[in-house]
Image (spheres, rainbow, N blue to C red):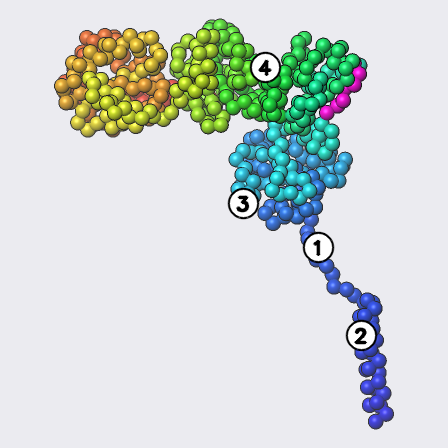
């Protein structure tokens, strides 16, 4: 009995002690789960859909690169972005860089409407809804400066003449705003532009002594280039917002005509001017100097409205831009306008690259009168009501490769003098065969309609399409008069071995086409 009582007392004391131990906090506590660190690649956070929100929460300033791993521009900027990330991490713990591979994180790409690669966005204080776009930055120093200007002052105050003179000689390019009237929004627009253009130092002058020294009497922006003896002035009347400031600064920093290459392509597309005109020409041709002089003269007149670009046709690395504009060697020299907003292309309606032709083309484009280069014009209502049928891209195959009718087609450019001179001759040929149900005489504006044929001739050129053929044609290379056209047509119609000749001619044409196409592959 005593033993049982003693055992019961000991158990009670033990339970009581354990209970008190729990109340006093003595003893092991349950461990809290720590989220794993976000993976890094050379000091750049590797962001995914599962850790993106945490990265925003943990970092006051987070600059994110949205990229495609195999994209050449993404690869080019990768090292610079990493260097900047390392430098800023050592300097300021509040700033981190991150990256999102869009091929793996499609939902993030969709959420932030990523359409270009790479795209950079700055997230501040965890705000996921209103990131700031970082455009035009491609170097480590550029990223660092851009972040600095977002976190602190974007302008250097130049309050003495010595400071001003030293500042404008401090870099290859420097930008100064002169504030004479502080009541306007000039300073706000100028300061906002400075935050978005980190590659150049920005200074601000408000001191009367400095304004008098420079000779400035109104609000103005000046762009200084170390290698130029003159500087460029932008008046306040030209500025309605920060985009105007950026557009004009970048315009004056660029050459009047910029030659396209891998390095300048970034600069060209960073200028917030969405009208680009391109001259495709060989720099080794005899006519190049004259053409370039005309192109450059037009560039000076339309500076700030249209970006003028030279594409050297001798440079093999320009192959992709040739493909994009569907330019062939036989087409050059050629001039095209590209509207970056709508991705619409325009072809200059003239053969000769002269100042007047370029000037007229540019003005026509800016006035909204230029004719877009498209796959096809609309089919005219009366396209088949006249002796010469009018073809466009949409009805070309139906007429040219007709099962019952042979077609003889003139490919022309509406501005070509030679084409215009041949229109009456072609009309006469149409009248000769308008009552022949087996023959169709037609014409097509090949500058406004894309067709599935590789053309080797400069306009005007002519091809015969035998009835029942699906992909063959015979190139006409004879004299350009009514008698020669008629003789050729009659010969093709009466030939007993027309099918064999068609195929042979087509194969010969195809062989020439392939040889020429091989030369075009840049």
Cα–Cα span, label 2 and label 1: 29 Å
User: Does the CB distance between marks 2 and 3 fall below 8 Å?
Assistant: no
Q: Which residue is mark 1?
A: 34
Q: Residues within 10 Å of mark 4 (few under 14, many from 20)?
A: some
Q: Which region of the structure is painted magenta? A: 155-161
What secondary structure is found at the residue carrying circle 2?
A: helix
Q: Which residue is mark 3?
A: 107
Q: Is residue 346 placed above or below 13 in the rendered structure?
A: above
Marked residue nearer the N-terminal end (1 or 4) = 1
What secondary structure is found at the residue carrying circle 3?
A: helix
Marked residue nearer the N-terminal end (4 or 3) = 3
Name the residue: 66% across, 24% down.
185
Residue 166, quarter of picture: top right
Left or right of 410, for residue 151: right
Left or right of 365, for residue 52: right
Q: In the rendered structure, does residue 156 fall within the stretch colored magenta?
A: yes
């Amino acid at each position: 009995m005593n033993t049982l009582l003693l055992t019961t007392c000991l158990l009670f004391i033990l339970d009581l002690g354990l209970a008190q131990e729990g109340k006093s906090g003595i003893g092991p506590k349950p461990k809290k789960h720590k989220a794993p660190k976000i993976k890094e690649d050379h000091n750049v956070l590797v962001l995914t859909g599962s850790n993106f929100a945490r990265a925003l929460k943990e970092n006051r300033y987070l600059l994110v690169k949205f990229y495609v791993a195999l994209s050449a521009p993404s690869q080019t900027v990768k090292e610079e972005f990493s260097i900047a990330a390392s430098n800023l991490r050592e300097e300021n713990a509040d700033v981190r860089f991150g990256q999102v591979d869009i091929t793996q994180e499609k939902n993030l790409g969709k959420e932030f409407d990523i359409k270009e690669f790479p795209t950079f966005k700055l997230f501040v204080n965890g705000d996921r809804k209103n990131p700031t776009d970082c455009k035009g930055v491609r170097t480590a120093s550029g990223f660092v400066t851009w972040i600095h200007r977002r976190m602190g002052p974007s302008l250097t105050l130049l309050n003495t003449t010595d400071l001003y003179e030293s500042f404008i000689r401090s870099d290859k390019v420097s930008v100064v705003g002169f504030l004479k009237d502080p009541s306007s929004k000039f300073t706000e627009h100028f300061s906002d532009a400075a935050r978005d253009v980190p590659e150049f130092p920005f200074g601000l002058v408000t001191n009367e002594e400095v304004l008098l020294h420079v000779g400035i009497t109104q609000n103005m922006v000046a762009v200084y280039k170390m290698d130029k003896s003159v500087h460029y002035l932008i008046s306040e009347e030209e500025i309605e917002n920060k985009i105007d400031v950026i557009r004009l600064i970048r315009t004056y920093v660029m050459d009047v005509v910029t030659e396209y290459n891998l390095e300048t392509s970034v600069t060209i597309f960073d200028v917030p001017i969405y009208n680009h005109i391109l001259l495709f020409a060989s720099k080794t041709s005899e006519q190049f100097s004259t053409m370039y002089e005309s192109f450059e003269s037009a560039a000076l007149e339309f500076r700030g409205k249209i970006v003028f670009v030279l594409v050297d046709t001798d440079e093999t690395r320009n192959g992709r831009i040739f493909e994009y504009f569907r330019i062939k060697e036989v087409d050059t020299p050629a001039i095209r306008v590209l509207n970056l907003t709508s991705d619409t292309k325009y072809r200059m309606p003239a053969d000769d690259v002269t100042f007047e032709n370029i000037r007229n083309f540019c003005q026509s484009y800016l006035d909204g009168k230029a004719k877009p280069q498209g796959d096809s014009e609309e089919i005219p209502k009366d396209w088949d009501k006249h002796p010469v049928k009018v073809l466009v891209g949409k009805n070309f195959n139906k007429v040219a490769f007709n099962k019952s009718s042979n077609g003889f087609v003139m490919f022309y450019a509406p501005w070509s003098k030679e084409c215009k001179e041949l229109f009456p001759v072609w009309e006469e040929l149409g009248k000769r065969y308008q009552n022949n149900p087996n023959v169709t005489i037609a014409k097509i504006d090949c500058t406004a309609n894309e067709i599935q044929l590789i053309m080797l001739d400069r306009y005007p050129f002519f091809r015969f399409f035998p009835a029942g053929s699906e992909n063959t044609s015979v190139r006409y290379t004879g004299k350009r008069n009514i008698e020669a056209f008629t003789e050729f047509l009659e010969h093709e119609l009466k030939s007993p071995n027309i099918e064999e000749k068609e195929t042979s001619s087509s194969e010969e044409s195809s062989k020439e086409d392939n040889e020429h196409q091989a030369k075009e592959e840049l």
